Amino acid sequence: MSAPVVILLASYQGGEHIAAQLDSIARQTHADWSLIVSDDASRDDTCAIVRDFAERMRPGQVQLVQGPAQGATANFLTLLDHAPRGAMIAFCDQDDHWLPHKLEWAVEYLSRQDGPAHYAARTIITDQQLRPLTQSRHFPRPLGFRNAVVQAIMAGNTSVFNAAAADLLRQGAPFALKAGILSHDWWAYQLTSGVGAALWHDPRPALLYRQHDRAEVGRNDTLPALAARLRKLLAGDFGAWMAANHAALVPMQDHLTARNRDILDRVDKMLSQPGPKALLTMRQAGLYRQTRPGNVALAATVAAGRLRRR
């Protein structure tokens, strides 16, 4: 299937693993791709590896640009403006290993959609040497804005967007940068679901997700990882993240569906209320996480007033 995909890779000090990732991109069964690497002033051999890879590809297929040097999220957000209009875009981490059909599966789904569409997939979690450990979680409940407001499940390293969704992300990126959002993929899930985009989380693993000490975001399916996230919920970090996401979405609210604009208004109200009132507002908005323990933890955090703006 002929459909151009622009891969956006944010790099920083990635010399140890980026060559393997680039080689996995070169082996994609969907061959109509180009790659833009935005490097955040790496001091290792990351840029040299990218330049060598570019020389082995067709002229112009691989570009290396200078990143903003403000962290991975800002790097991805600014990368959006480098992507040409009218193409699908795929986010890419520097240290994963794409399975051969990753782009093909995404393009098959996205090409069937008329409006904005967002594809993501499960992963195979591995150790640093790419030895498989387990698969990432399956999410049983429906995808949508009421979930996206309180949970990031469309992993950026698997996310691919059709041209209509890419245009929305491009429009919204300056507001996300100004708001100081935590995570580009969480924000992307919120914006695409908010406008009523077609969403699919493929149950088939699309890549090997390498775990190592310098990984930007590690696995979240272990008890220590879940406990760490619960501590952040109770510490109030989650409320600050939600407030930043809300600030990023407000300038784009005219693109949201009427129902989701109402939910966005309720989120604003919830973030300003004391615990018991905030819990009632959350329930009226119908917000939910994917698992029962996750919903219990969220409700307890809201009831304790931990989401309230400081």
Image (cartoon, rainbow, N blue to C red):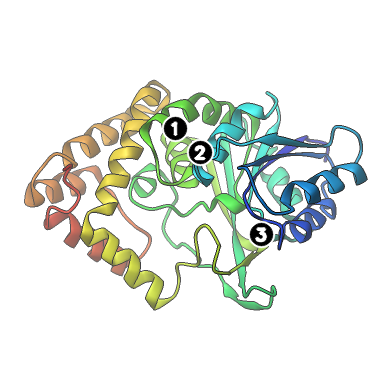
Calculate the distance from the C-alpha at mark 2 to the C-alpha at mark 3. 18 Å
Calculate the distance from the C-alpha at mark 1 to the C-alpha at mark 2. 6 Å
- Give the residue pinned by disc 2: 74
Give, as a three-letter code, the residue at label 2: Ala
Q: Earlier in the sequence, mark 2 or mark 3?
A: 2
Residue extending farthest top: 254
**Within 10 Å of the Cα at label 3, are there few (<14), some (14-19), or many (20+) other Cα atoms?**
many
- Give the residue pinned by disc 1: 177
Calculate the distance from the C-alpha at mark 1 to the C-alpha at mark 3. 24 Å
Q: Earlier in the sequence, mark 1 or mark 3?
A: 3
Q: Secondary structure at mark 2?
A: helix
Q: Earlier in the sequence, mark 1 or mark 2?
A: 2
Q: Looking at the image, is 118 positioned above or below residue 17?
A: above
Residue 228 in picture, x, y percent from top left: 34, 68
Front-most of 53 and 222? Answer: 53
- Give the residue pinned by disc 3: 95
Give, as a three-letter code, the residue at label 3: Asp
Q: Looking at the image, is 218 positioned above or below residue 22?
A: below
Residue 17 in picture, x, y percent from top left: 71, 62
Give, as a three-letter code, the residue at label 1: Leu
Front-most of 42 and 204? Answer: 42
Q: Residue at x 68, y 47 (%)?
A: 106
Residue contact between numbered discs 1 and 2, judged by CB atoms under 8 Å: yes
